[in-house]
Amino acid sequence: MDLNKFKPKKEKETRRLETYMIAADDPVGRSQLRPFFKRKRSGEVLTREQVSAIKQGRKLLRKEMKEQGLKRRIDFEVTATNMGLYFDRNRLFWPFFLWLIRDNTVLKVLATTAVLTTAVTVSVPVIEYLTEYITEYIEKIVEEIVTQTVTEYEEKEVDRFTISLSDELFNSGFTLSENITFENATTQLVATPAEGVPCISIRDIPRDVNDREGKYPSHAFLAYTFYCRYESTTEAPADYHWSLNITQESEVPMENPETGETFSRFTSDAIWVMIFEDNEMMLYAKTGADGEIEAIPEQGITDMGYNEPPMYEFAKDREGQYEVVAEGQYFDLYRIKPQNFVSETLVAEGLMTGVAPFDINTFDPTAPYDPENPNGIHKYTIVIWLEGDDPECTNELIGSKIGMNFTINLLTEENEGEEGSGEGTGGEQGGETPSEGA
């Protein structure tokens, strides 16, 4: 066979093949762990490094020859042999030949004795070989499991909603619970993800969304109600700062049909959020494409709006978040003006000051929550949905995901200046109301 016909297409592949040929000729290395049938070439036992180099070289050679149209096995073996990429053919172990000779008891006994002698002789290297093999196999399986676990965790993290207390707040006596009785108090809560949610209107959010505990039973949006309680052996009030953060979200590539320019849109572009704090609601949305408030209907429109402004009776800032578009004889038309997200990853933040410790003696677990007499307990409901009337809520966002985390941190004199100002909340026992932030 003319070896000159075989010409690798890429110089890089040629160098790799030459590297394997050189490594196959280098006798320095570790001994094979095979108890018998050790790999040989020209009668010489090869090292583990040589065996690996020959295997890799043969694999690469086979690939390159197929690309050249040389697919016959005989052509490959001749070429590999001339390049030194081959192994001697193993001959069957002679006791097994003896065992195959029938009707000869003496030979069978001799064969059995030889097999047993060989087994005893090689038992130690066999165990060493099996130990190394099993160890490598277990490590490979563990690596695959860890990789799969991390991947699944990252995928789940994308669309989950969590509530967590800082260590300082927990050590100060704060706990979380889905119900006001705090039967299962904890430092972290996780809401079941809302999957396959459609684009809906704020008008589709039920008015009792803040009346239930835990996750609201709906597949059209995510709503979760929980409580934060302060327990302490002292009577000193405490302050805390809360924030709603975007942990992860999908980035959807898009193209402008008119200009052909490509750009990215994120799930948060069409997400709207309600935050009920002690039964008072604030509305939030990301700024529009023009950088202004994402109002519905848009600013400048005066002939359409909401005749019954959604959630108006629960709004904390009615004048700021609801605007009369047009006055009518029977009803007025309203525009909704949500507060802007604080940043790309921070939806909202706020302060709770003067929280007095919980008093078990005045607590009635059967009574509804009373924000006028919180008794060390504060209630929160987070509602998240895809606002269908938002101009950035388009079909391209179908299937996208977002994850959020509501964190609560202890506010002290040391970190008071570091925390965001957010919108203030009146504290217990006459606590001072912080000023509103941007």
Image (cartoon, rainbow, N blue to C red):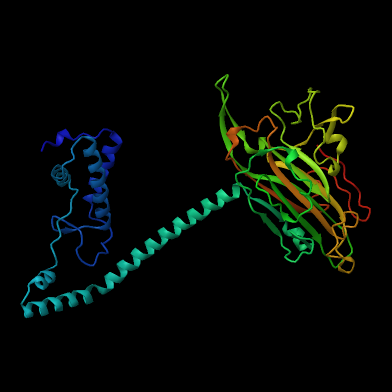
Q: Quadrant of the N terminus?
A: top left
Q: Is residue 10 visible?
A: yes
View extreme (right): residue: 430
Q: Is residue 418 visible?
A: no
View extreme (front): residue: 330
Most foreground residue, 328 or 369? 328
Total number of numbered discs in the rendering: 0
Residue 220, image x and y in percent? 66, 44
Q: Quadrant of residue 189?
A: bottom right
Residue 109, image x and y in percent? 11, 80
Most foreground residue, 333 or 87? 333
| Residue drawn 15% across the image and 60% down it | 90
Residue 201, image x and y in percent? 71, 37
Whether residue 416 sits left or right of residue 190 in the image: it is: right
View extreme (left): residue: 104
Whether residue 401 sits left or right of residue 223 in the image: it is: left
Q: Is residue 317 above or below residue 297?
A: below
Q: Is residue 13 above or below residue 95?
A: above
Residue 77, image x and y in percent? 15, 46
Q: Quadrant of residue 292?
A: top right
| Residue drawn 63% across the image and 38% down it | 267
Whether residue 84 sits left or right of residue 284 in the image: it is: left
Q: Quadrant of the C terminus?
A: top right
Q: Is residue 333 above or below residue 400?
A: above
